[in-house]
Image (spheres, rainbow, N blue to C red):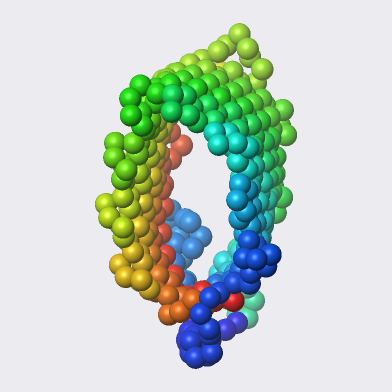
Amino acid sequence: MKKPIFLAALLCGCLTAASLYAKEGAGFTFDGGKLTVSPVVNMGVFWESNGNNSSHDEDAGAGYHIQPAISFSYAAKRMSFGANTYYTFERGFDSDNGQDSDSYGFSLSGRRELSRRWNLGISASYNHSENDQFTERPSGIPGISFASLYKDESDNYALNASLGYRSERWQFSFGAGWSRTETKGRNNWGSNDSNNYNVSALVGRAIGPSTYWNVSGSMSFDKSSNGETSTSYALMTGISGEVTNKTSYSAMVGVSFYDYSGNQDDTDFGPSYSVSIAHRFSRRITLSAAFDSRYESEQNANPGDYYSWSHNLTAAMNFQISDPLSARLSSTFSYEDHTAPAGGSYDRTYFQTAASLYYAFNSYVSLYTTASWRTDIADGAGYRDDDRDDIRLDAGLSFRF
């Protein structure tokens, strides 16, 4: 397996060659510039402090990843379409405790303006991920060791459609979607698959300049291979709009209802709310943030006795420091308070923050670096010192053709 210093030298060599011979304007255009095809190859190295995501046996290591991808975009007067496909493989350098992963997939999205006020949107995606963990431990006999290979796989499918309308006084949207998740646990133990179907609708009435009062309703139905089903409904109301041409917001509050395992006579409900904001400080600095919370009964044989109150916050800032140099800072925070009878309560706190820096040498070659920190803490019933921390550093080059 290649050493990190060798791969770094290879990347620097590719960078030098591409910088010397690249011409301006990446991507291939067709149909008078309406269709653009953009092949991309990302190559990089990484270091991780807790590659096996353990709370007691952290194992640090380094590795490399390569991701070829190709994207298509089409833009006409009243229609746009985009497609992307990729393949990523990542390999660790420690032969005694390897962390290998492969993933591939594609995504499609399209938008059509049916008229000046009506628009239609569709999207579809498929993603496959496969993680292999190879461990080797001594047997106590010289020259002999035990080896184990653990393999996890997952497939995710999604299909969504939306119809929207907006005028000076009214806004309306309708959405429908389907998603499917197939998982295979370690060496096919604990395999499961589930399907989700959802529909939603929103109606808004203008109550001021660029301000709408909204009412929305949604329904979601889940069914897993183990026979469990769940149905949830949500009714929300609130306002959305623009404070200025630089700031937009949305604030909704409501109630959700839950039925589990077909127990329609055992409906539980709880409050939920969501807030989001986007602000453009200047031409080069933008901020987006979203916060949501819900109180719900958990899917269980006796859902009325088990409740979870979750709070989730995501935020990101983008900086265009100069024409070739940009940066991004993002954070995710989640807190879950699980309440159960007979001392079964516990809470979970998850936090992740990442800082990224991008530098474009020209239209063909750019350098990226990312530093991230993640912590996942569970405390309470069934958990003891379950604190999982991980620091990851990435650096690499992106080649556009």
Residue 57 figure quarter: bottom left
Residue 153 shown left or right of residue 59 in the figure: right
Residue 292 figure quarter: top left
Q: Is residue 239 depicted above or below 319 in this figure? A: above
The percent coordinates of residue 17 (x first, y second) are 52, 90
Q: How many marks?
A: 0
Q: Residue at x 59, y 76 (%)?
A: 401
Q: Residue at x 43, y 55 (%)?
A: 56
The percent coordinates of residue 373 (x first, y second) are 37, 58
Q: Residue at x 51, y 60 (%)?
A: 52
Q: Residue at x 27, y 52 (%)?
A: 281
Q: Is residue 302 visible?
A: yes
Looking at the figure, which quarter contains the N terminus? bottom right
The percent coordinates of residue 247 (x first, y second) are 31, 42
Nearest the viewer among 194 and 159 is: 159
Q: Is residue 305 visible?
A: no
Q: Residue furthest top?
A: 265
The percent coordinates of residue 370 (x first, y second) are 40, 66
Residue 391 shown left or right of residue 18 in the figure: left
Q: Is residue 318 depicted above or below 142 in this figure? A: above
Nearest the viewer among 375 and 124 is: 124
Nearest the viewer among 320 and 350 is: 320
Residue 210 figure quarter: top left
